[in-house]
Every structure is written in C-alpha cells, then in structure tokens.
Image (spheres, rainbow, N blue to C red):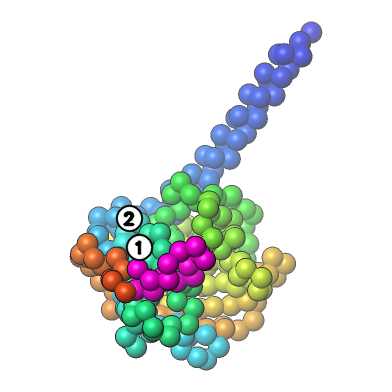
Amino acid sequence: MFSRQMVGVGLVAIMMLWLGGCGSVSHDFAKSTQQAHGVKAWKSHKAFEADIEVVYRGKTMLEGRILVDTRSEKARLTTFAGPELIWDGEYAWVTPADAPVTDARKHIRTWPYVITMPFRLGDRKVMIEPQNQMPIWDDQFDTAKVTYKNDADKPAWSIVYRQVGTNLIRSVAYDKAGDDPQALIFNRFIVMDGVKISTEWAMFMWSEQSGITGTPLGKVVLRNLRWAHPTKESFMAPEGARLVDAPQNMAAAK
C-alpha cells in the first residue's frame, strides 16, 4: 500500500515533469524561431535603421526613419514631417514639445516591437504557449500564444504564425485593447548579413473562429535598411521634450 505522503510526492513529481515539458516546448519554439531569423547576427550589430511608411485604410499614418537598438527595446523615430519620437527604455517622448503628433506613443512602441519580435521571443518577460496549427488560406502554420509580463504597451496577447520548415514568422495576430483583433502578414523577406527581415507587412482583420479574413486594411513598408552606429544620445530625449501619456503625478516636460 502507498501512503498518502508517497502519493502526494508522486503527484508533485508528475506535475513538475509536466511543467518542465511545457517549458521545454516553449523554449524550443522561441529558440528555433530566433535562430531562423538570425538572432546571433542581429545582436552582433548595435542598431537597425530603416525608412518606414504606414498606410491604414488608404491614409498615410506615418512616414519617417526608425532606429532600434538590437539588444533592448530603445527606439527613435524621426518623422519626415520633422517631429521625433523616442522610447528611452522607460518613457516615451516627443520633440519638439509642441509637435502635434497623433498616436505618438502607439507608433514608437508598436513598430519597433514588430521589427524586433522575432529576435526577442527568448526574453524573460515573454511568455510562450505553443498552440495547434492554424491556417492562413490554404497553408497550415505552427502557432503560439505570446504574452508579456508588466508591459502595458504590448498587446494583451498575440498569436504568432510560424512557417513550417523555415521557422520564419509569417504573421502575427494581436489584441487591440477593446477593438476587434487584427493581424499582420509578413511578405518580401530580405537577408541582411544573415538576418532575415520582412520589408512589407499587410494588415487584416482576425478572429479566433475564422483567423485572417477579408481584404487588406493597410500596409507597412520598410525601405533603405541598414545597420547603424547610435551615439549615447540617440535614445535619449533632448531638453524640452514632451513626455507622452505621462501619469498625473509626473511633470509634462523633461
């Protein structure tokens, strides 16, 4: 006969093995995806830079030059209209302070996040839950649910579609905080010194029941891609910059 203590120890052991197995699957998904996109080569450079154009429902929402740090989430977006958006790793800024930039925080947090996502799936703040395969039209893709710890700017959840065989991320569906979920499909991959990056993204509606549906809502295009050498000031807000969406107990300017 087994004692209650022995049964309890056995259940704990089984649970630990199950959790360990889940963790291993998540780790393997992240590792193989990062490797497919060339994470080692990505991190060998200090920063990535490209021209970016965002078009939504026929209207150009953003045109500028985006600079992202390859080892953190810091970013700088210099719009072609003049104003600059900065994410210093903790706060979002606009300069000059009186620049009338619409959705400044959304732009400086969203597009760097999408660009760097394939290389950051292994970060400690990223939680990955592999799911069943899901289709995009006629093709089946490996999928995983991605959530983030303590980051209000990230989607509450994302569904990553990974191409079978290549392990490249071909689409990501994401929660829009109250609006219907949408998805990006990544097209036109290029190889930069061993790093695979998509330069054309198409926006679609998405639902859990039907997946990606309808015709494209918009697009994002990256042009003139290159590696950059940022200075210490590249990801710092200059004097007089305006803090975006500052809590009430914080100053409105630096």
Residue drawn where x is 38% and y is 66% of the image: 87
Name the one closer to the observer, 83 or 18: 83
Identify the residue at the far right of this view.
1
**Above or below, 237 relative to 60:** above
Q: Amino acid at mark 1?
A: Asp
Q: Residue 136 at what x, y percent from top left?
A: 60, 69
Give the residue type that dot 2 points to: Arg
Q: Is residue 123 above or below residue 108?
A: above
Which residue does the image show at 49% across and 78% down from the upper left?
A: 103
Marked residue nearer the N-terminal end (1 or 2):
2
Q: Residues within 10 Å of mark 1 (few under 14, many from 20)?
A: some
Q: Which mark is residue 71?
A: 2
Which residue is pictured at 31% across the width and 68% down the height? 237
Q: Quadrant of residue 46?
A: bottom left
Residue 186's tag is none
Q: Is residue 121 left or right of residue 13?
A: left
Quadrant (top left/top right/bottom left/bottom right) for the N terminus: top right
List the residue tagged with mark 1.
88
- 250 drawn magenta: yes
From where the camera sits, is residue 49 visible? Answer: no
Q: Quadrant of residue 231?
A: bottom left
Considering depth in this image, is 153 or 251 the residue closer to the camera?
251
Q: Regarding mark 1 in the picture, which secondary structure is present there?
A: loop
